[in-house]
Image (cartoon, grey):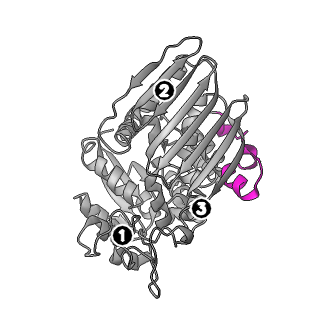
Amino acid sequence: MSKIRVGIIGAGGRGILCFGRLFTTKFAGDVEIAGLADPNLVRAEAGVESLKIQVPVYESAEDLARRKDVDAVVVTTPDYLHESACVTAFKHGKHVLVDKPLATSARGCLNIMESAHKAKKLLYMGFNLRHVPVLHKLKELVDAGAFGEIFSMQAIEYYNGGRTYMSRWNRLKKFTGGLFIHKGSHDFDIINWIMGRARPAQVSCFANVFTLNPRHLPFKTRPGLKPGPTCFVCPYVKECPDVWPDYRPDTGDTLHHKMYGKKAAAVDGYRVDLCMYLSEKDTHDQGVANILYDNGATAAHSEYFVTPKHDRLYFVEGTKGHAEISLSDGRIEFLPRWTSDRVEYKISDPIGGHGGADSIMCAEFIRCLKKGLRPAASGIDGAWSVAIGESCELSRVKNRMVKISEVLDVKHPLLKK
């Protein structure tokens, strides 16, 4: 295979600013973008213009996927469209890289896996955290037996940028399946990866919108002057500390405004700058999940989207040692049992999105296509992480322990390959 001809389905930040830019710069020698699909043609055309390429744009994934000169597609739509986009691509015989999560339900994940199996095409799961160098080092230590048998793990995400989810499509479960699927799938996958052969069995969860609600508006309102509904029209924009990060007058002359400004919003009504405090939402801004694995090991994951801190922390407990990991510092501190030793590993990240992980992931996707290699993360990994997230969302609503088998057919033959 010479140049891989790729179609991008979804003209948002990941489709254009991540994969689009990488394929037209760093990997231009291996990849050629053949087309872009998005129901909002204004946004799609702005994305193509920003990449300085001339390719067709389509309103439907079907129109792009049916092209015989397209080898593979990258799916970066809102989460609820992943299943239909992937199934369509496989139906037309394309390889697929799908950004996390695989789907918004465990059943949807299996539908995608069944389609990939029938088409005999690559399903590459876009878990960029698996390509972060410091987590790669952690996995090496685990596989080398440094920890003995892992019996517990904690993952904590401090994500100040997550507050903007409440301004965008991410705030509604109908688009994400819930933030434990949309965001938590990253960390649930890392926990599963470190746990090895153990599989999640039961989940309990608590989560709510504690801060990003009208009660916590970060400024005083004045009589007769209502805040919101968007940053661009809000009379308090100059005094709000949570104004949309890319706020500026809607002149329409920047990439941001071409993709998300008035002209694009006139097509589908979508804005990225709704007031995060006043917007309608049914997701959470903080939550805690607990997981029991089938071998008795335990894990916990916390998500905090209202915080001045920005980091992912992991704590790993094994029969032979303990470790603390910080992604922002690129640091692993390992404490072996029965000694007073402390071994510190400092891992430098390459330059690029998500600490260079996006670039590493794209490079591996290309190698998998050219050499027929197995991906670092497959549909199996995508399905198990979504199953945990879906169980968390169910536990949150039902206020009870949920078995993974309630949402995922754990005996499905494709989960054993």
State whether residue 99 appears in this view: no
Instruction: Tell me the number on the disc at residue 209.
Output: 3
Q: Distance between the residues labelled 1 and 3?
A: 26 Å
Q: Position of residue 289 (x, y in %)?
A: 65, 46
On-image quarter of the N terminus:
top left
Q: Position of residue 161 (x, y in %)?
A: 43, 55
Residue at the spot of label 2: 138
State whether residue 343 appears in this view: yes
Q: The disc labelled 1 sits on which kind of residue?
A: Tyr
Q: Position of residue 231 (x, y in %)?
A: 39, 73
SS under mark 3 = loop
Crowdedness near tag 1: few (<14), some (14–19) or many (≥20) residues, C-alpha within 10 Å: many
SS under mark 1 = helix
Q: Distance between the residues labelled 3 and 2?
A: 33 Å
Earlier sequence position, callout 1 versus callout 3? 3
Residues at marks 3 and 2 touching, judged by CB atoms closer than 8 Å: no
Crowdedness near tag 2: few (<14), some (14–19) or many (≥20) residues, C-alpha within 10 Å: many
Q: The disc labelled 3 sits on which kind of residue?
A: Val
Q: Does the magenta stretch include residue 381?
A: no
SS under mark 2 = helix
Callout count:
3
Which residue corresponds to the image point at 59% horizontal and 55% vertical from the top-left? 104
Which residue corresponds to the image point at 55% horizontal and 57% vertical from the top-left? 285
Which residue corresponds to the image point at 29% horizontal and 70% vertical from the top-left? 248
Q: The disc labelled 2 sits on which kind of residue?
A: Leu
Q: Which of 318 and 227 is in front in this view?
A: 227
Which residue corresponds to the image point at 33% horizontal and 55% vertical from the top-left? 17
Residue at the spot of label 1: 260
Magenta residues?
391-416
Tag in front: 2 or 1? 2
Earlier sequence position, callout 2 versus callout 1? 2
